Amino acid sequence: MTKGTAHTRVQYFSSNANAESERVQIQLHPGCRAHHKNFDFDFAEIAIKNRSAQGNTVTKYPIKKVIFKEKGNSELGGRPFWFEPAVGRLNRDGRGVFLGHFNTGDLLIAVYEEGAYELLEPGVQYRFDTEELLLLNKWNPEMPLNVCHYIPSAKAWYIKRFRVETTTFQKRFSFVVDEKGAKAAFSWQHPSPKVAFEWGTTRKKDRKVLELDQFMEVKGWKAMGNRLTTQPLLGAELLNPLLGEELTDEEKGRVENLQEDIWQEHEVPEPTKSAKGGTSSKRGGGQGKSGTRGGGEQQKLF
């Protein structure tokens, strides 16, 4: 990196996988004659050159310390990620469902059958159980989550719409009532989803198409939402899926076939009868104090 001149040294070094720039704070030696001994420096202001280039002069005074402050945007653009349901992993090789291009600060949102969501930084280190995964998308903080969840004490399925307000990574946050057997069955990140629901029995099924944004407004995550049905829920299908990001020509050349989104059709876990005649999830659930987490007036959709 240097010309090998005597007394040459590297004061600060970092390497970012997606070529993100950085902003650092430079602290000069307190004994120097500079008027400003602490100042910020943004690497994004420097053009990318070859390794033999000398670079730009930052200061002629001795530097005591260089402190990292924040990452900037990538010089290469967002990195593409795919999700392969067969193995439950993310990859960058074009296998499975295309999730989008992720730049610095972009996050994934995962919604689980237990009735919880989680924000994640994109990476190939995660492994998901697709049996409990309802949704895996690039997170848009302005777009509400639409979920269909079961409340055991009411023996009914409910619909709720809320925006994710947490910012903690790799931590699950529950959005269902604190009751044994409470769970979620479907989830969509969509501003105005049009969904076809089916409930009843295999011999006698009812089908209803709902535009969820016309039946309820976005509320807090603690709200119960609006009641959908007290009958067994058989399925749901999103009729107006959003168009995802497009691949670049180079990426299209590496990827021959993209699988269809697996979240449009998700099997509903069948509730089992409890000793008291209620219902509970086959997978059980955490024991908790019976009741709701408050918020929101209950309303029937129809």
Image (cartoon, helix red, strand yellow):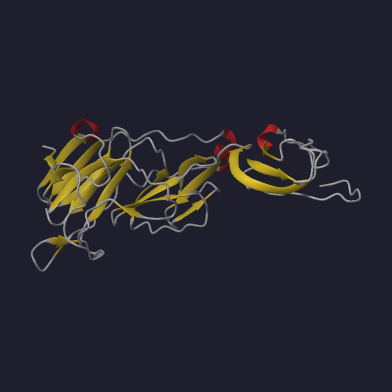
Residue sitting farthest toward the right: 6
- Can you say which quadrant of the picture contains the C terminus? top left
The residue located at (57%, 42%) in the rendering is 254
Task: Locate residue 262, reporting x and y percent.
Answer: 36, 47
The image quadrant of residue 60 is top right
* Residue 108 in view in this figure: yes
Say if 288 sits above or below 118 in the image.
below
Residue sitting farthest toward the bottom: 275
Task: Locate residue 97, reporting x and y percent.
Answer: 44, 45
Say if 25 sits above or below 130 in the image.
above
The image quadrant of residue 69 is top right
Q: In the figure, is residue 242 to the left or right of 44?
A: left
Task: Locate residue 290, reporting x and y percent.
Answer: 16, 60
- Figure disc tally: 0
Task: Locate residue 127, reporting x and y percent.
Answer: 45, 59
* Residue 20 in view in this figure: no
Give 150 or 38, whichever is nearer the viewer: 38
Give 226 or 274, whichever is nearer the viewer: 226
Give 10 or 284, whichever is nearer the viewer: 10
Say if 88 sits above or below 210 in the image.
below
The residue located at (57%, 33%) in the rendering is 249
Q: In the figure, is residue 110 to the left or right of 214?
A: right
Q: In the figure, is residue 97 to the left or right of 16?
A: left
